[in-house]
Image (cartoon, rainbow, N blue to C red):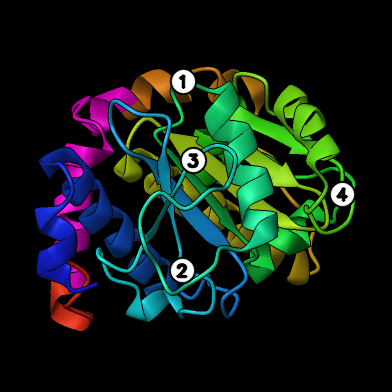
Amino acid sequence: MSSSAVRANVSPAEWQTRVDLAAAYRLVALYGWDDLVFTHLSARIPGTESFLINPYGMMFDEITASSLVKIDLAGNKLAPSPYEINPAGFTIHSAVHAARADAGCVMHTHSLNGIAVSAQAEGLLPLSQQSQFILPALAYHDYEGIAVNADEKPRLVRDLGGKHVMLLRNHGLLTLGSTIADAFVALYFAEAACAIQVRAQAGGGALRPIPGEIQLGIAAQARVTTLDLGPERLVWPGLLRRLDRRNPGYAD
C-alpha cells in the first residue's frame, strides 16, 4: 500500500507514530546497532493496545512509515501487509507492551557492545558518566534461547519490573520509554556505556569505578544539565535533522 493510502486510512496520531518509529529504525542503522533484519523496535499506537513493528526482511535503513506492520497483542495483523513479523520480536515486545502501560515504545538490539557486556558476570559497571544514566534503571534477564516460547513472557516481565533498561544476558539490550524519543535516548546511553566499558577493559589497566557518593547525585545533576526538557524536546528534533541529511525518506 502506498504512503498516501496508508496515511489516508490511519489517525493522525498513528501516522506520527509511524514516522517517528521509522526514523528510529533508520537511526539505529545509522549508529551501527542493527543486526541485519534480526532485531526490532515497536511503538504502541496512542489510545490503543495495538502496536507497530518492523516488516520482517526489510533492512532498518530502508524502513518507512507506511511499511511498518500493525499488530495486536496476539500477533494478528490489523492492516494489510506483504510482510510477516519476527516471531521472537513479537514474543518480547508483546510481553512488555501488555505488562507496562508506560511502554509507548520498546527497543531491542543485538549490538556487539551490548552483547559483550551482557555476557559479563558483573554486567554493567559504574565506569563512565554514561553508565550513571543507565544503572539506576537497569534490570537483567537470563538467556533462555531464542525468544520464541510464550512461557518466557512472565519471567521477562518479572525481571524487568518497573525498570526501563534491561540487559538480556548473552543477548543484547532492551529499552522502553513513554515516547520513541525516550526509548531511543535510553538506548543511546546504554550502548555508549557498554562500548566504554568494553574499551576500558581492553586497555588492560586497573579500572576506576565512580564512587557511590557521586553516583547518588547524578540524577539531580542530569536534570540541571538537560534543563529538564526531556529527550523528545532536547534531542529528538536534532536527530531527525541529522537523519534528513543522511537518509531521508523515512516519512514515506
Work out how far the residue at label 1 is from the one at label 3, CA to CA, in angstroms.
15 Å
Q: CA separation, marks 2 and 3?
A: 15 Å
Residue found 9% across the figure and 67% down from its top: 4
Towards the viewer: 40 or 193:
40
Q: Which mark is residue 72?
A: 3
Q: Quadrant of residue 29?
A: bottom left
Which of pointers 1 and 3 indicates the residue nearer the eye?
Answer: 3
Residue at 11%, 43% in the rendered image? 12
Task: Indicate which disc, 1 or 2, sits on the residue closer to the N terminus.
Answer: 2
- Residue under label 2, please give it: 55
Mark 4 closeness class: few <14, some 14–19, many ≥20 residues within 10 Å: some
- Magenta extent: 223-243
**Upstream in sequence: badge 4 or badge 1:** 1
Residue of label 4: 143
Residue displayed at 67% across by 20% down: 161
Residue nearer the viewer, 60 or 239: 60
User: Are circles 4 and 3 on residues that touch, CB within 8 Å?
Assistant: no
Q: Residue at x 18, y 47 (%)?
A: 10
Q: Residue 79's image quarter?
A: bottom left
